[in-house]
Image (tube, rainbow, N blue to C red):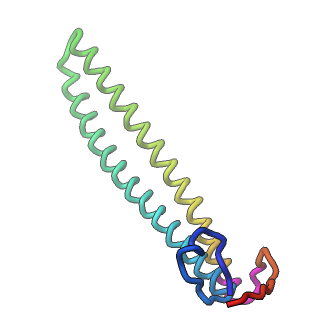
Amino acid sequence: MVAAQSDKLKHAYLQDLSREKFALNAFEEEKKFQMKQIEKLQKAIEKLEASIEENRTTLEDLERSGQYLVGSNLTENQEKIENVEKEINGKQMKINQAKDNISTLQNAVDALDRSMQEVHDGTYQFNAPITSVEMDF
């Protein structure tokens, strides 16, 4: 039987699990969490890419209208163009960061898969040796 070290013991029943089954459950829960994080990042990337497309359309419109402007209107238009370009660059940096984070999370998922396979194979090295504790009921 494996007992988690948490406050849940005060308010929940112990599950009769081997340490292998307990480890597999913990790995599976962590894998689900990591996969949800990857999914969230992928959705964020899609939204950023759509936003960049909108910015590019705005940029094209500003450049087209800038051909016919002079004086302060031209200066104002050029500032708008610079701001839109900065927004695009900022969003692109966020996309690159999200892709790096996805790569890191995918490496964690791969490591969890390897650990789960090692538990199935019996080659996983648990941190603590098996200890027996006598309990009075």
Residue located at (79% from left, 76% from top): 128
Q: Main secondary structure of the magenta part?
A: helix
Residue located at (58% from left, 80% from top): 25
Please determine whether, in this image, residue 53 is positioned above or below residue 8: above
Q: Quadrant of the C terminus?
A: bottom right
- Where in the figure is residue 64, as x and y percent of width and height? 21, 29
- Where in the figure is residue 40, as x and y percent of width and height? 42, 60
Q: Quadrant of the N terminus?
A: bottom right
Residue located at (52% from left, 48% from top): 97
- Looking at this view, name the residue that lies furthest to the top: 71
Choose top left, top right, bottom left or bottom right for residue 73: top left
Comparing 39 with 62, the one in front is 39
- Where in the figure is residue 74, as x and y percent of width and height? 24, 16
Q: Report whether 3 appears left or right of 55.
A: right
Choose top left, top right, bottom left or bottom right for residue 69: top left
Q: Report whether 11 appears left or right of 82.
A: right
Residue located at (59% from left, 59% from top): 104
Is residue 124 within the magenta segment? yes
- Where in the figure is residue 75, as x and y percent of width and height? 28, 14
Comparing 80 with 132, the one in front is 132
Q: Report whether 42 appears left or right of 126.
A: left
Q: Which residues are magenta?
A: 116-125
